[in-house]
Image (cartoon, rainbow, N blue to C red):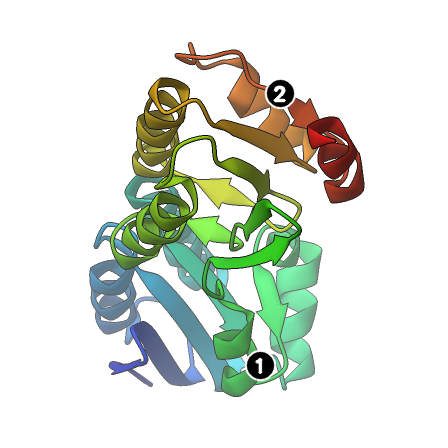
């Protein structure tokens, strides 16, 4: 039994091996995984390819790590559920329903949030949000891309939220900052395609301007016409 972590492209990969039955080896697993997820905004892949057996104590550690990750704005993805006993236990306890599960480490790494991107259609800039903005570099990149889009008087910007699954308070702070700037510069930002969860979060915040939210990019583009 063992657990070790390594960092690849800003993602911590925690690899665990062996059979987990009772307290043997669980302290190391809890220490390594806990250290990885407790850092604010961290991204973690838990590789279970070599794990052959898990029990209730191991599951408790995993559940606690999930709670730690949520509090820190971090994310855990599971991968490599090769052994039937491990898959069965995770399905039976329904833990597979709260984690993003992948076949391999490479698949899990690719699934993490891509960059914030922008494109132009006529005189409108469309900024597409990534999947997750827990904190740190991802929010800084969002700030930069959206800032470049709104950095001219009378700008027309659509913020597309169709891929957005999670945004922490720092992300909302950046959006509020740019909404204020656009208001004073005579420009406009329209939001589009938020999920039900993101739409609920948007409705709970006292915005400095009235938010205009559309279902699709096409609808938002027509609203600028």
Which residue is under mark 1?
107
Q: How packed is label 2: few (under 14 Cα within 10 Å), some, or many (20 or more)?
A: few
Name the spot of residue 44 as percent of width and height, x first: 37, 67
Q: Is residue 47 left or right of residue 28?
A: right
Name above or below for residue 180 compared with residue 32. above
Name above or below for residue 119 compared with residue 44. above
Nearer the observer, 219 or 129: 219
Q: Dot 1: what SS?
A: helix
User: Considering only order in the chain, which callout, 2 or 1, is on the residue closer to the N terminus?
Assistant: 1
Q: CA distance from mark 1 to mark 2?
A: 36 Å
Q: Is residue 42 left or right of residue 109?
A: left
Q: Quadrant of residue 174?
A: top left
Nearer the observer, 65 or 23: 65
- The structure residue drawn at horizontal position 36% and vertical position 63%, both measured from the top left corner, is 43
- In which quadrant is the C terminus drawn? top right
Name above or below for residue 166 compared with residue 62. above
- Dots 1 and 2: beta carbons under 8 Å? no
Q: How packed is label 1: few (under 14 Cα within 10 Å), some, or many (20 or more)?
A: few
- The structure residue drawn at horizontal position 61% and vertical position 68%, both measured from the top left corner, is 101
- The structure residue drawn at horizontal position 42% and vertical position 9%, both measured from the top left corner, is 206
Name the spot of residue 173 as percent of width and height, x first: 31, 30
Q: Is residue 186 left or right of residue 14?
A: right
Name the spot of residue 218 as percent of width and height, x first: 79, 42
The numbered dot on residue 212 is 2
Name the spot of residue 115 as percent of width and height, x first: 45, 64
């Amino acid at each position: 039994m063992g657990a070790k972590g390594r960092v690849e492209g800003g993602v911590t990969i925690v690899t665990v091996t062996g059979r987990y039955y009772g307290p043997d080896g669980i302290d190391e697993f809890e220490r390594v995984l806990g250290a990885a997820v407790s850092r604010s905004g961290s991204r973690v892949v838990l590789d279970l390819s070599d794990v052959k057996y898990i029990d209730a104590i191991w599951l408790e550690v995993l559940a606690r790590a999930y709670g730690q990750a949520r509090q820190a704005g971090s994310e855990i993805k599971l991968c490599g559920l090769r052994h039937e006993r491990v898959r069965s236990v995770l399905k039976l306890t329904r833990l597979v329903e709260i984690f993003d599960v992948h076949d391999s480490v490479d698949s899990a790494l690719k699934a993490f949030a891509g960059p914030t991107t922008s494109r132009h259609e006529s005189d409108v800039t469309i900024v597409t949000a990534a999947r997750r903005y827990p904190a740190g570099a991802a929010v800084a990149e969002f700030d930069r891309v959206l800032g470049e889009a709104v950095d001219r008087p009378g700008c027309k910007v659509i913020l597309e939220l169709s891929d957005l699954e999670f945004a922490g308070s720092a992300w909302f702070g950046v959006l509020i900052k740019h909404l204020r700037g656009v208001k004073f510069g005579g420009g406009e930002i329209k939001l589009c395609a938020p999920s039900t969860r993101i739409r609920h979060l948007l409705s709970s915040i006292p915005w400095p301007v009235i938010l205009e939210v559309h279902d699709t990019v096409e609808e938002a583009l027509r609203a600028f016409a």
